[in-house]
């Protein structure tokens, strides 16, 4: 009986693959990438809330709150001119080259908990990179516009994304903060579209949706 | 007001954090909260603290130690660990599985991640027919 179900499963899978090939039904899978604390989950939550009414994950001011990639499927985004695009949004853990548990202690976290967080965050980076290698069709690269965009990680990541020929939209987030400088991000990455938003307040997200339709549609 | 170890009767001052690690003398994990007046009841009445614990209605404090997880080599996130300058520990199991390089510095909780090693395409396995 077990064998029957197994063969049935593979046959079903093969058949659905065949159908997909015929109808070219392929969803666009968009990964939200960026350094820790750029506001990736806040944006993922906003997109999910705006178009499906759900949330994706919890947010926190402590870096590396998201340590596993989270996916929200079948988000249908429609633009002003009636265009729509169906996409899966993948909220990924913040990508960085250095993780030290000491940085979490400053937020009042216990040492043991901080060490576990550091370990999970490291695994999270590997997971985020794994998704980028395997399963992403487009990237939203989030940056905190109050910080220096010329960080090594950002240059490296944009380089990796470019090398994979993935379409990328750069989001200059946190424009609600007084020392936000989205122009700095624009000048750092002139080769890519840059959209300034406040994910927290929802400012200018319509602009982002239009850009997403244009580049990922 | 003090706590007493139910196993050996050692006294601990109220609010002492030492008991959280278990009794220093015998390693006991159960402590009874005793009134000052009854502090030496166990000796005077020649009873064990366990018996007194049963008689009194005070709640016995049980110290639960968090289980220490033994992280196996292959469970670790890092491929290379810098134990001390010039001293390295290699996680061969992980190195064999993947090209991803994560270096851990010091004892634990501090990592350096080589993003470029993670951006590489995994070599496609060739299917050989027998």
Image (cartoon, coloured by chain):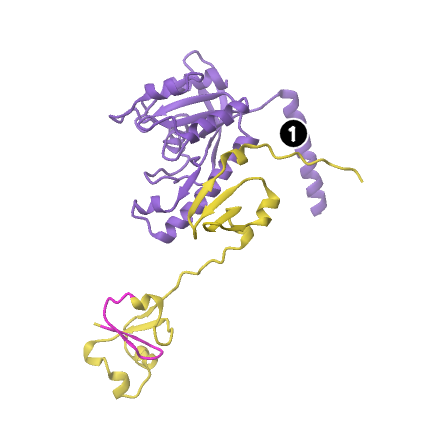
Which residue has dot 1 on it? A16
B15 magenta-colored:
yes
Please determine whether, in this image, residue A198 is positioned above or below residue B42.
above
Which residue occupies the foreground of this view, A173 or B89?
B89
Please determine whether, in this image, residue B100 is positioned above or below residue A146.
below
Question: Residue at left 34%, top 39%?
Answer: A60
Q: Where are the magenta residues, as a range? A: B2-17
Task: Name the chief secondary structure element in magenta.
Answer: loop
Instruction: Name the chain under label 1.
Output: A
Task: Give the residue at the far right of this rendering.
Answer: B130
Question: Residue at left 44%, top 37%?
Answer: A97
Q: Please indicate whether residue B115 sits to the left or right of residue A2 in the image.
A: left
Q: Say which quarter of the image contains residue B122.
A: top right
Tell me where residue A200 appears, x and y as whole percent. Answer: 32, 29
The hue of chain B in the figure is yellow
Q: Say which quarter of the image contains residue A65.
A: top left
Q: Please indicate whether residue B14 sits to the left or right of residue A158 in the image.
A: left
Tell me where residue B24 appears, x and y as whole percent. Answer: 34, 73
- Mark 1: which secondary structure? helix
A198 magenta-colored:
no
Question: Residue at left 24%, top 75%?
Answer: B34
The hue of chain A in the figure is purple
Which residue occupies the foreground of this view, A9 or A193?
A193
Please determine whether, in this image, residue B74 is positioned above or below residue A77.
below
Q: Is residue B113 visible?
A: yes
Tell me where residue B12 appears, x and y as whole percent. Answer: 26, 73
Q: Residues within 10 Å of mark 1 (few under 14, many from 20)?
A: few
Q: Is residue A205 visible?
A: no
Q: Please indicate whether residue A41 sits to the left or right of residue B96 in the image.
A: left
Tell me where residue B55 appears, x and y as whole percent. Answer: 30, 80
């Amino acid at each position: 009986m077990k064998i029957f179900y197994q063969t049935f499963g593979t046959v079903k899978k093969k058949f659905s693959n065949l159908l997909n090939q015929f109808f070219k039904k392929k969803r666009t899978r968009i990964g939200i990438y960026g350094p820790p604390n750029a506001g990736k989950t806040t944006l993922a939550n906003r997109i999910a809330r705006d178009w499906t009414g759900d949330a994706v994950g919890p947010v926190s001011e402590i870096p590396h709150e998201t340590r596993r990639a989270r996916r929200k499927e079948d988000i249908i985004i429609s633009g002003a001119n009636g265009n729509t695009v169906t996409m899966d949004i993948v909220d990924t853990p913040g990508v960085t080259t250095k993780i030290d548990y000491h940085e979490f202690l400053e937020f009042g976290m216990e040492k043991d908990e901080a060490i576990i967080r550091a370990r999970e965050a490291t695994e999270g980076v590997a997971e985020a990179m794994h998704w980028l290698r395997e399963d992403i069709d487009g990237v939203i690269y989030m940056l905190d516009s109050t910080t220096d965009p010329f960080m090594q990680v950002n240059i490296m990541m944009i380089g990796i994304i470019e090398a994979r020929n993935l379409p990328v939209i750069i989001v200059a987030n946190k424009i609600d903060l007084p020392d936000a400088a989205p122009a700095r991000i624009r000048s750092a990455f002139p080769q890519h579209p840059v959209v300034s938003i406040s994910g927290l307040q929802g400012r200018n997200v319509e602009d982002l949706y239009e850009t997403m339709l244009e580049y990922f549609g | 007001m003090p706590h007493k170890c139910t196993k050996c009767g050692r006294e601990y001052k109220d609010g002492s954090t030492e008991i959280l690690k278990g009794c220093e003398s015998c390693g006991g994990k159960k402590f009874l909260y005793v009134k000052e007046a009854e502090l030496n009841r166990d000796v005077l009445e020649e009873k064990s603290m366990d018996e007194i614990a049963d008689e009194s209605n005070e709640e016995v404090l049980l110290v639960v130690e968090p289980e220490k997880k033994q992280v196996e080599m292959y469970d670790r996130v890092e491929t290379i660990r810098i134990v001390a300058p010039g001293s390295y520990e290699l996680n061969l199991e992980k190195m064999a599985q993947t090209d991803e390089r994560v270096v851990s510095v010091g004892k634990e909780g501090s990592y350096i991640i080589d993003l470029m090693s993670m951006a590489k395409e995994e070599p496609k396995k060739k299917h050989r027919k027998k």
